[in-house]
Image (tube, rainbow, N blue to C red):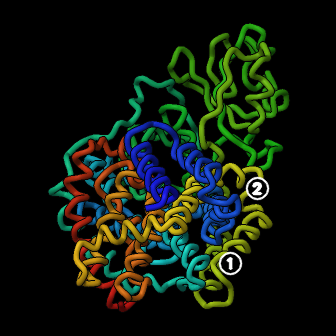
Amino acid sequence: MTWQMLLSLGTVLAVLATLAFSRIAPDVILVGALAFLMVVGVLTPAEALSGFSNPGVMTIATLYVVAAGLKETGAIQWLAHRLLGQPQRLRQAQLRVLLPASGLSAFMNNTTVVAMFIPAVQEWAGRLRLPPSKLLLPLSFAAILGGTCTLIGTSTNLVVDGLLQSEMNTHLAMFELAWVGVPLLIVGGGFLYLFADRLLPNRQGALEQLERAREYAVEVSVLEKGPLVGKTIAEAGLRHLSHGYLAEIERHGHLLTAVPPETELQAGDVLIFIGAPECARELRRIHGLRPAGGDVRKLDIDHHRRCLVEAVIGPDFAGLNQTVRESRFRSRYQAVILSISRHGKRLPGKLGDISFQVGDTLLLETAQDFVDQYRYRKDFLLVSALNDSTPPDFRKAPLALGILASMVLASASGWLSILEAALLAGGAMLATRCVPASKARRYVDLSVLIVIGASFALGAAMTKTGAASQIAQWLMFRDDLAPWLALALVYLMTVIFTELITNNAAAVLMFPIAVAMAEQLGVSYMPFTVAIMFAASASFMTPLGYQTNLMVLGPGGYRFLDYVRLGAPLSLIVGTTAVVLVPVVWPF
């Protein structure tokens, strides 16, 4: 073994140990490893940085912009409310989660899909008197399984396809993985449908308690000719919000109190919700509702620049002891008051008739630069924006979905490569203002791209120094090892790496080892590289292996053993099915 080989192996082991057992950010660890391999002369600068020009990495970066357009227009919520429906029993709810989540994640970013579905699933859990723990982990697992069905379903598929393009001068088609991905989805989804209820605990999520939050009364009206007209309160998903509850309905000048869930909504109904400030954010994301006050529509601020802000009135506030109407608040501050809280409690009565007092907390809809503008002014004691509170522009949701469909069609038909189609789709999202350029930049997750790009340096070092071939020889404990057994070893090793470190880094590290094993066996490398795609995505046993698993940890009230209890048998079923089917589609 040469010193370069030993150094490469030592670097890989150090990276694995640091990723698994330290709290240092993965991008810092992998960039440090890249720098070390370049400085000691194992890799040239061009070899060390080649990952950042890989087509797979650039495709992932571009798809962040496409996902941003889908999120900003509320396209996924728009679809979710139509696909999820209003199930009455747990089994129906599970099926309504598994089918749409897996279908959407085949074409959209898994993280975005799960983030949009979590509030809907929490609403179900409250209405059906079910613990969210029975639904949220199956949601994450369904999104992971759905992502294996297409080339763009998960970033791991794009990373390995990028390696195939750069190292082997070949690539996969958009739906080529579906020959194995769809059977995996059917088998895995069937297991979740039959056994998730039995294997998951009966546990509540860690939701914020309303009595401990600042309480507001938020008024919204039902749009004429909107999707909510004629639906009952329960069917509209308004019965159990995460951060508030429906207190009253104002209809034709009459006030309806203690409204039953079967009450049908009519055009022009004013719904009065009581809850935490996040309740206003939830309501803005429901298609068919708009703020009841006309002042919001008069606000001269572009839709994508709006957000929700809390502001506490200070002693130098110009409108003290004046009513909201008298103070001309909207004209003076370019902000509209949605609700006022005093001493942590909502103030009853008409908003325009409330007089301002020092210490009142205002819930505002205003421009994103409001916080910077008034943070150090004496009008307000405290100013803070609610995270992710820009209201979706539902008018552009069909346009965003049309752009996504065009991208998939152009790539699947062979007219354009997946990178070219993604670049055009991202450009269309920006050109049509589905997402502004300033927001699109914030959606691009640089840390993930840096992790992927830097991981390529480790793979390059293992290939160049022969370390990958050496590891392949160690794995082949017999000279006459059967190809299917070698494939199973590659799959198992990838799954272990994925559970310990990031899925993309695991795929990049295993790629040269898999290719070396195929060469030593004298068989095709394709079944081995495709097996890596499925194994790196099949992270079911820990909350850290896949981002969506971590996202449902708090809302579902899960513990580490909950993932093992449901994820271990699912990993075994999915792994066995993949190892059997992959050589059938891509023969040795």
Q: Nearer the viewer, residue 545 or 224?
A: 545
x and y percent of residue 253 in the render? 58, 41
Tell which circle, 2 or 1, labels the residue nearer the N-terminal end.
Answer: 1
x and y percent of residue 273 in the render? 50, 38
Confirm whether residue 557 shows in the render: yes
The residue positioned 41% from the left and 55% from the top of the image is 546
Confirm whether residue 236 shows in the render: no
Q: Amino acid at mark 1?
A: Ala
Q: Nearer the viewer, residue 314 or 167?
A: 167
Q: Quadrant of residue 247?
A: top left
Q: Please, is residue 210 above or below residue 401 in the view? A: above
Residue topped by disc 1: 421
Residue topped by disc 2: 436
Q: Please, is residue 502 above or below residue 186 in the view? A: above
Query: In the figure, is residue 55 to the left or right of 326?
Result: left
Q: For the residues marked 2 and 1, what is the alpha-carbon distance in whole angstroms?
A: 20 Å
Q: Under tag 1, what secondary structure?
A: helix
